[in-house]
Structures are given as structure tokens and as C-alpha cells.
Image (spheres, rainbow, N blue to C red):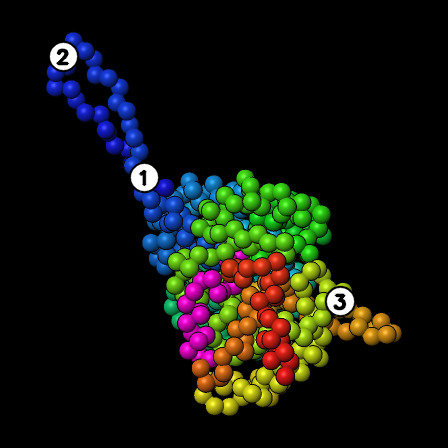
Amino acid sequence: MNEEPFDHTEPDPTADTAATPDPPRRRRKAWRPEADSEAAALLRHLAATPWLIGGRDDDLIAAVRRNEAALRSAVARLGWVLVIERDLVRLRKGAPPRPAVWALRGPSQAACSWFFLLIAAAESMPPRTALGQLVTAARAAAAEAGLPSHNDMAERRAIVAALRMLDERGVVERLDGDMDGYLHDEQAPVLLAVHHTRLAYVVANPGTLDPATDPHGWLEQAQREPDPARRMRRALVDDTCVHTALLDEAEAQWLSHRVRGDDGAPLAEAFGLDLERRAEGAAFVVPDEAFRHFRQLGPMPFPVPGTIAHAALLLLDHAAIHGTTTNGPGPGWRGLTQEQVADALAGFAAGNASGKGGWGAEYSSDPHLLASKVRDLLTGSNLVHPAHAGTQADQTTAPMWWFSPTTGRWAEEGSAAPKATRSRTRSSKNTSGAKHTPARPSSQATRPQEGPDLFSTLTAEQQEEHAR
């Protein structure tokens, strides 16, 4: 908070100033009511975009400096590190709450490998270097590490993808030329700027172990936060929601005793979010006034317009009615087999494949491709957990989709309106922050319907209508 002192002491005109020394001045601090909301908005922005680069984000960097004390206090509760330099702000986070799912949303393995090979090469490069020189040094680093290099089109695409990630972070920035030119010409005239001081901040969670002497221990530190309290805070801030049924004993104890007290509630307040606690779990909820665009809610907001999101909404409605509760992770979870999901999506596609606002042809003609995209969206948003369960007499395993109780809040939206009016209805709903569940940066889940069971809003009459 930016605070400036001012003097409220008024002189007494009858006092003998010659005989009486001046009393000590009482100083008050002016405070701006909007300062807390500014700090909260910055925390949400940094959680989604942990790199702020000079020349691109100057206004945000200035705002971070104004609110430095409040920001450092909040991120310290998460075990994160906030780096503030003249032309750089870097938020270094701990291990993500669901690393396996998050990795699926990330770049390819080849792009990640070249990302770090380019970083290793950039350390010895001059501040201005050609793209071809940097890639040549990266190939030498790959050979030293015993990694194969094929120099084919797939590898070049991975290199360009890695260069773009470095450019987005301001570590190796493009000054001139077109990076795509490297796909067809190794000596494409592309000038890069290497910021050597920023190379040290690339790894957000370096841990305390030496990866050279204990690689397995280092990977374990990088993939999972060892402290359960920090792990839960991170999950609430940086994921959609926390499900009670999926917690271990230490995490469940924290959720039961500390999420509403001195640990969870103040953290939600610092980020400008509302704490929502249910028997099924907890979430930090985005207030309606806290955002204006979908992109502010994270990389996977939901629900949003589009074929994949619409199919996901219809599937949530279908699971709420036809899903099984047998052998589920916990109360309120609904399960569908992989085949049931594909059959349901095929039926939805048949009714939405033509006309204005119809689904894309590539998805309408391939239910399994559509199911894969819907699964990525719903698992990324922490709304579906794929698993295997014995469903036949011989106990052979069948892939299952388990829909969390949180999905019940949208169960009626998928088929409440006919296709002719769905676009307008969905648009009006999507203007409210209480109807969106982003996956990352902030948990930023949505307000639920009232009642002990989030699926209870589907009345018996509605269920019969859907069943027909």
C-alpha cells in the first residue's frame, strides 16, 4: 500500500511559542481504500502471468513496486518468492497441486528439452546473438548430455516453440527477424537479446537438493510441495477447487481446521477472492467485479463459447442424470464409462452439427476426438477425474470419468435452452464471474447452488424429461 504521512497538528494561537517548546507532532498516515484492491488484482495477475518484463509491462511493474510490502506478505504464506528488479518482476511458485494434469496442458516434451538446452547455451552467449549461433551452441549442449539431435522438421518446430517460450518470458528476446524462418533456413537472419541475469529465475521451484547428486530427490521436490499447509494454500489459489475425497489425512485436517481461520480466509482476502466451503471441498471464488475478460481467469476458463465447452456442458448435464455413484471417490461424484461418454457426445453432435452456431465438422464426425478434447478441458479445470473401475462380473477394468460434485452447478445449463436461443442465453450467463471456473491462475471457482447436494437442483420432473 502506498502510504504518505501528513500532519494533523494545528498551532494554538494563544500559546507562548517562545517559552514553550514545540510539542511532538502526531503523524497520521493517509491510506487509499483502493490500494488493497490493487494489490489483490496484482496478485491474481501474477498468479496467471508470473513474468512481467520492462518495456512490455511497465505500468504493472510500477504497480508492483507501489504494493511491494502487501505482495510479499501474501506470497510468503504460499512459500513463493517474488523477485523485483528494475525491468523485471518474477513470481517463483512452488510445486503445482496436480503436476501430472498440468504437464498435459504444457508444451511437448521435445519443446521442453530444447527450452532448457537453449538456456544452457544462452549462458555463454553474448548479449546480442544470432538465432543460428544460439541453436548451434544448444546442439553442442545436447551432444554433451548424450541427447540425440535429428535436425528434422519436427525438431526445428520444437526449437522454435522453445524460443517463443523464452521470448514470452523475456529471457531470450527477439529483436529483429522472423523466428519461423528458422524452419526452412538454419541461418535465418534473426537477432536475439540474451538477458543473462534472468536465466537464474527460469526454474521457479529449484528446491534444496542438488539435481546432479540426487536427481530423483530433486524431481520429487519439484513435483510435490512437502508441507501440506502450503500444498493446500497453493491448490486453493492456483487451481479451480479442492475436493475433500481426494485429500490425504494431513490435507484433510488442514481443510477441516484452518481453511476458515487464520490460514485460508486471510489468503483469500489478500487475493480479493471469496472463500467457499462445502462438505465436498472448498474453493476461492472470483467476485463478479474482479474480471472483465475470460483470459483474466486463467488458461482454461469454463464455461465459455465454443464447441468443446458446449459439449462439456451437455456432458455435465448427462452425467448428473445418468451417472453412477457406485465406487465413486466420494459423496456427490457421478461416473460414466468411456464408452458412455463417447455415445453421449455422438448423440449431442448429431443434434448440433448443422445450422447457425453448429459444432465444428471435425468434432461432429469424430466423437472420440471430441471426447479427448472435452476430457482435457474438464480434467484441466479439476472437474473430472479419469480412473479405472471394475464394472463387470469378471472385474475387468473399464475407463471411467468421475464428475466432481462441483459440476452440479452447471448441470441444467447444458440443455436448458434450445439451439436457436442457446447462443444469446449462454452469452448473458458468461458475463458473470459467478458462472466461470478457470483452471489456472487462481482457483477462482464459482458460486454453487444452495443445498447439501449440488445435484439436488435437478427435480424429479426434470430428470424424467431428460430421460425421455
Towards the viewer: 230 or 357: 357
**Any part of residue 202 in sight:** no
- Picture coordinates of residue 323 (x, y %)? 68, 72
Q: Residues within 10 Å of mark 1 (few under 14, many from 20)?
A: few
Q: Quadrant of the C terminus?
A: bottom right
Side (left or right) of 377 relative to 398: left
| Labelled disc at residue 270 | none
The segment highlighted magenta reads: 422-444
Task: Check disc 3 and report the residue beneath it.
Answer: 326
Three-letter residue code for mark 2: Asp
Q: CA distance from mark 1 to mark 2?
A: 34 Å
Task: Check disc 2 and report the residue beneath it.
Answer: 16
Q: Earlier in the sequence, mark 2 or mark 3?
A: 2
**Any part of residue 148 in sight:** yes
343 inside magenta stretch: no
Give the structural element (helix, strand or loop) at label 2. loop
Residue located at (35% from left, 57% from top): 55
The mark closer to the camera, 1 or 3, is 3
Residue located at (42% from left, 49% from top): 40
Q: CA distance from mark 2 to mark 3?
A: 88 Å
Query: Are circles 1 and 3 on residues that touch, CB within 8 Å?
Result: no
Q: Earlier in the sequence, mark 1 or mark 2?
A: 2
Q: Earlier in the sequence, mark 1 or mark 3?
A: 1
431 inside magenta stretch: yes
Task: Check disc 1 and report the residue beneath it.
Answer: 31
Residue located at (55% from left, 55% from top): 283
Q: Tell me which corner region of the image, top left, top right, bottom left or bottom right, holds residue 130.
A: bottom left
